[in-house]
Amino acid sequence: MQTIQHWINGTATEGDAGRFGDVTNPATGKVTSRVALASAATTQEAIAAAAAAFPAWRDTSLARRVQVLFSFRELLNARKGELAAIITAEHGKVLEDAFGEIARGQEVVEFACGIPHLIKGGYTENASTKVDVHSIRQPLGVSAIISPFNFPAMVPMWFFPVAIAAGNTIVLKPSEKDPTAANWLAALWKEAGLPDGVFNVVHGDKESVDALLDSPDVASVSFVGSTPIAKYVYERGTATGKRVQALGGAKNHMLVLPDADLDLAADAAVNAGFGAAGERCMAISAVVAVEAIADELVAKIAERTRTLRIGDGTRGCDMGPLVTAAHRDKVAGYIDAGEDAGATLVLDGRNPSPDAEGDGFFLNPTLFDHVTPDMTIYQDEIFGPVLSVVRVDGFDEGIELVNANPYGNGTAIFTNDGGAARRFENEVTVGMIGINVPIPVPMAYYSFGGWKNSLFGDTHAYGTEGVHFFTRGKVVTTRWQDPSHGGLNLGFPTNA
């Protein structure tokens, strides 16, 4: 069986741990390869390679760095079909969705190609008499990226293009559930001309994560995952002096007002609720329907959901499997809990008939109505194809419900009332907002990140905030004396 190895200093290596994990095709249930799990020593080897490569890469000209970025962008664009096939084979999402993931990641690559403009400083002549002041931004050093299974290409690309363009070096720890995409990206960087050691990959579990968090040679950590682990990463990483951005979980609401286009809203709820089998941190999991239109909206959502074709992502289906059998069973348990709690089960996904061979990890899309905030299907991030409809009396109750939730990642409102939309935008305590847009993931020149328990740290991903995260500023005050200067003056210097 093929072993997926680590990528350290430009070379594939198995490491010294002697531990391995199975990699499974979720659509068939078959183990397709095994992945080496790094020890702390192997992780430190990757960190050391990145640290050794940092001085030369930091001092490489901006022009040369951008050339490498452009080359990577062109190679990625030409060969994205290979990467999409890898994502579908190991994660399970349909091919169209895999291509979409790559496209959104490539936006950040293209944004990072503008790094000379993004990190240029300012200059002030004669701030004081014959004193000039200028500012510069410099890279941090070794940057660790710990990424989740649901976006094995896009989420790492939220971070490493900007980090590399700014002069940092990388150790990427992808999910062990779908690790091949990370190695594919590493090989593409090498082909693009990136020097060995600038981009490294270690596969593993908690042992490798802790090694990254504890190493004094790691300057920053970027993490995306569940809220409990995000909090752990943030606290452990900052305790050792690292700069940390840890993006956590979500419970995203979509408020639908009576004046909304209900066909548009129903389409959006199905697309955002069941795309990638609900395994998205920006998935809509709670539709908040004003009572006056709730019955009609639920009927429209159910009608559309019944048309979805479930199966192997290579067969032109609408929705693929969940990533593992254990996760499939966990999501099915939430369906049991919702039914037991008294929610109305409109569509039951526990008996799927997928278009796939073998024993894949499938659930059909599930729709609950009359869900209340005390139910676990509302409170927990299920991360599966389970959509809950919560009924409210009006706009005020809807926004109170959204704001009372401990998560604040993304939210949306569907309405044709500009005043209501503006008030929602102003009052809602959520980091990313869509107005008649169900999945408001910002473009690469903005920044991605939530509020409350959806983010630990002060900086969002990519965009201007991402540039600031991967650099630190210096301000330099300069005075060059002319030959006539001389004499002593022990008084306090002033701006005269």
Image (cartoon, rainbow, N blue to C red):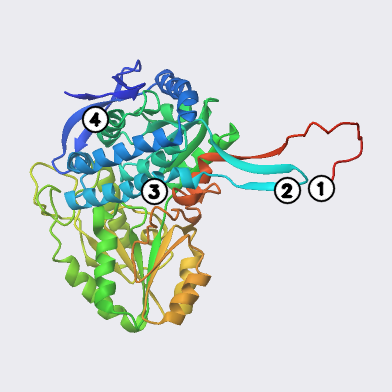
Mark 1 highlights which residue?
495
Q: Which residue is mark 3?
A: 111
Classify residue 22 as left or right of residue 224.
Answer: left
Residue annotated with mark 2? 127
Of residues 128 and 256, which is closer to you in this image? 128
Sequence-earlier tag: 1 or 4: 4
Circle 4: residue type = Asp
Q: Quadrant of residue 71?
A: top left
- Of the numbered discs 2 and 3, the one sitting upstream in the chain is 3
Q: Earlier in the sequence, mark 3 or mark 1?
A: 3
Residue at 27 percent across and 78 percent down: it is 262
Instruction: Indicate the secondary structure of the residue bearing disc 4.
Output: strand
The reply to whether dot 1 and dot 2 touch (C-beta < 8 Å) is: yes
Compute the Cα span from label 3 to label 1: 40 Å
Reply above or below: 198 against 378: above
Tag 4–tag 2 contact (CB < 8 Å): no
CA distance for labels 2 and 3: 33 Å
Rendering coords of residue 258 (x, y %): 35, 83
Q: Is residue 163 above or below residue 274?
A: above
Measured from the top left, where is residue 406 in percent x and y? 49, 58
- Give the label, 2 or 3, closer to the camera: 2
Task: From the image, tell me which residue sits under label 4.
Answer: 22
The residue positioned 34% from the left and 28% from the top of the image is 203
User: In terms of sequence position, does the residue under pointer 4 or pointer 2 come before the other?
Assistant: 4
Please, what is the three-letter code of the amino acid marked with disc 3? Phe
Q: Nearer the viewer, residue 278 or 483?
A: 483
Identify the secondary structure beneath mark 2.
strand
Above or below: residue 60 compared with residue 366? above
Q: Is the residue marked by circle 3 packed among few (<14), some (14-19), or many (20+) residues within 10 Å?
A: many
Asked whether, in this view, residue 174 is left or right of residue 222, the answer is left
- Residue type at tag 2: Ala
